[in-house]
Amino acid sequence: MPVERTVAYFSMEIGLQQDIPTYSGGLGVLAGDTIRSAADLSVPMVGVTLLYDQGYFYQKLDEQGNQIEEPVQWSVDDFLQKVPQTTALTIGGREVHLRAWKYDVFGVDGFCVPVFLLDSNLEENHPDDRHITSSLYGGDDAYRFCQEMVLGIGGVRMLQALGFQDIRHHHMNEGHASLLTIELLERAKQQNPRAGAGALVENVRKQCVFTTHTPVPAGHDRFPLDLAKRLMNHPVFDEMPEMVSESGMVNMTLIGMNFSNYINGVAKLHGEVSRSMFPEYAIHSITNGVHSATWTAESFTRLFDAYIPGWKRDCHGLRHALKIPKSDIWDAHFTAKETLIRVINRETNLGLDADVFTIGFARRSATYKRADLIFHDIERLKNIAKKSGRFQIIYAGKAHPKDEGGKEIIRRIHRAAKQLKDVINVAYVANYDMGLGKLLTSGVDLWLNTPLCPREASGTSGMKAAHNGVPSLSVMDGWWVEGCIEGVTGWAVGNGCAVGEEETEADNAQDADRLYEKLEHNIIPLYYRNRDGFVSMMQQIIALNASHFNTQRMVQEYVSHAYFR
């Protein structure tokens, strides 16, 4: 390779582009944005993930809101280049051969960060093993553990086969990639057979960075120890049990943290929460961001190009949005809104109106995200629309195929939509992806976020909205603790919660009441009765939040704090 690569970024999912279904949501989109900004900043990085020839899943919704999942049909070689190098690892006593496909991410000045997608669908593999890399977050524990072996162990071996000999920093984007540390441990043993366990562990730690993304227990992968031993058959489980397991379970988060020199959460509050969850570890925080050029609508891109030349190279320059004429800000917003409304009407036939105040909510459908909180009191919601001004709501989001609670949330929203149809239009658009995400975050008038606090580690959809001047109404959790200036960049639902406290479903009524108060008395009246004030807020959102909550700033922090310190 002509450019020395010193950072390898491993992620179970990476959102490379809308039509490559190798992502399911925020984790993968963040990974893609990270790589795009690394390319912009000429960071010597290489990315590693899995191929997923059946994607996550294609979502269909019936009239009752029942989610129907189908495999994604896509042509791999239309988007990716197959490389000739191969590697192999042993899984459950069988040799599993891997090939890789390459996707090049080019930065604003032409620097390339290659991403390699590992593929087990080779004829020489056992039929069961050919499907290891087929489906994102599919299958049972054994299937998932096999995937994580391929990502971590197979990923390190593939980089070596590809000729990347200079990797000094292995960045694990969540615990899915943690088994790469065991492969690095094995290499250290081979290079220095007489080294003691402590020296070997320290050798690996110097090479590893670990980012944890969730305070939700289900987000931390744990596998039965006997399953891991059967599939992996590595002495580490007996020689260093305290490093890899607890209570008879292999804990991927603990493996990642035990073998890393730098560990971080993804927002300041999340760093505090993570330290309370894992008090024996030194956990830092680097707040997430989004790739500015990717998530800015075409109308705002033209505006920024005209008034803030060079903003793609220096995202901090977006603070100069304050000098853009308000009429131009509004025109750019309304253009993005009209584009969104056309698409939603084509998909749903609901007849949404671009002149009506529009609320957006789009993210993975999980119970703790409380997508249906706004429908807590249907009659009050109707009264707000009659007294303060008309509004409409657009939803999107997939529930994991095994998450019945998340699927029920989608059904509840459909039931609420039918109850409100004569007063408030509610749309739920199927098959949420990067393209729809960009349309929504740039085209609505308000971005809604109502998770149970403190279960949202960061959240990035509100950051995307900020790049298009769209204010947020959000629970004080994740990034919003840092991004909310009440009445300036948006509005808060409640005051948040202290570390160690946790909201429950019993708090729904109080949070819904707070949400209604802001909509009725602050937000909708501002939109309809003080348009100049609303557009001033849009300017401030871009200048204060978009200029900071971007992956350019985030990657610079990783470079200075984690990679090359």
Image (cartoon, helix red, strand yellow):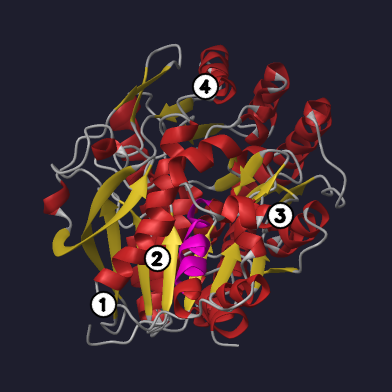
Q: Nearer the viewer, mark 3 or mark 4?
A: 3
Residue 242 x/y as whole percent? 71, 54
Which class describes the residues within 10 Å of circle 4: few (<14), some (14-19), or many (20+)? many
Which class describes the residues within 10 Å of circle 1: few (<14), some (14-19), or many (20+)? few
Which class describes the residues within 10 Å of circle 3: few (<14), some (14-19), or many (20+)? few
Q: Earlier in the sequence, mark 1 or mark 4?
A: 1
Q: Nearer the viewer, mark 2 or mark 1?
A: 1
Q: Nearer the viewer, mark 3 or mark 1?
A: 3
Q: CA distance from mark 4 to mark 2?
A: 35 Å
Q: Earlier in the sequence, mark 2 or mark 1?
A: 1
Q: Earlier in the sequence, mark 3 or mark 1?
A: 1
| Mark 1 residue type | Gly
Q: CA distance from mark 3 to mark 2?
A: 52 Å
Which residues are drawn in magenta?
176-187
Residue picked out by circle 3: 242
- The secondary structure that dominates the magenta segment is helix
Residue drawn at 47 percent across, 47 percent down: 233
Q: CA distance from mark 2 to mark 1?
A: 41 Å
Q: Nearer the viewer, residue 561 or 538?
A: 561
Q: Secondary structure at mark 3?
A: helix
Q: Is residue 263 magenta?
A: no
Say which mark, if any, is on residue 300: 2
- Using the rendered view, name the quadrant where residue 453 is placed: top right
Residue picked out by circle 4: 407
Horizontal side, residue 321 vs residue 346: left or right? right
